[in-house]
Amino acid sequence: MKPSFAPTALLAATLLLALPLAAGAKDKPKEPDNRPVLHVSVVESVSAPGNAFTDFDRFDLGLQRAAAQRKWPVRIAAERLAGNTPDHATELRVTLQRVRREPIEDYIFRAWVILVIDGRKQDFGIVTYHYSARMGQNPDDIYQDVFRGGAAAIADKVEPVLFPELKAKK
């Protein structure tokens, strides 16, 4: 009995013909985000060597999430503060301090927050967020939760000044 290659060839031909259809279905162009930009300049302490995911990255993700949950009408553009960073008309300046770990798995997020709108500064001072970790919780998850909570605490302070119309809707 001779092996037949017909079923294999038929399957291969079907897959090759279906491939362009599947590729065309998901290649829709993404609409550009035309919302105004809220520039966030972040100053962070030097993090421990060897960590690819820094405090800046965790804070950026936390602030993006807080803005999305609150339906802020802006895009968040976070950048590390550097000597060549231009001034922006509206800018949120955040100076992160190291997350402090206290006994019994308490973590404290602290950041100094200044909002600049058209050259006028509003200093919110040190914003603090306390997080109590569960025993056995993954350290990466702990720090992610700490920075999410810290970003939400900053959003609580900044939102009434930046978006008073959102508070009026609630």
Image (cartoon, grey):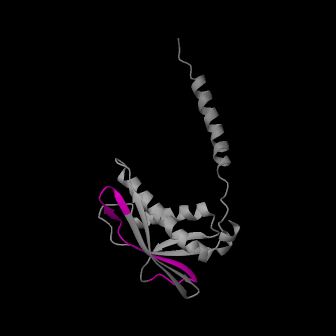
Residue 37 x/y as whole percent:
60, 74
Q: Is residue 78 magenta?
A: no
User: In the rendered image, is residue 150 in sight?
Assistant: yes
Rendered view: 9 above or below 23: above
> For the view shown, which residue lies furthest in the right direction?
169
Residue 31 x/y as whole percent:
67, 62
> For the view shown, which residue lies furthest in the front direction?
104
Rendered view: 110 above or below 124: above
Residue 115 x/y as whole percent:
53, 80
Q: Which quadrant of the rendered structure holds the C terminus?
A: bottom right
| Residue at x 60% of width, y 29% of height | 11
| Residue at x 35% of width, y 59% of height | 106
Rendered view: 115 above or below 108: below
Number of callouts: 0
Residue 167 x/y as whole percent:
65, 70
Q: Is residue 98 magenta?
A: yes
The one of 138 and 28 positioned closer to us in this rendering = 138
| Residue at x 55% of width, y 74% of height | 158
The one of 70 and 41 positioned closer to us in this rendering = 70
User: In the rendered image, is residue 34 in sight?
Assistant: no
Rendered view: 135 above or below 45: above
- Where on the picture, by quarter, is residue 132? bottom left
Query: In the image, which residues are magenta?
Result: 84-107
> For the view shown, which residue lies furthest in the bottom direction?
119
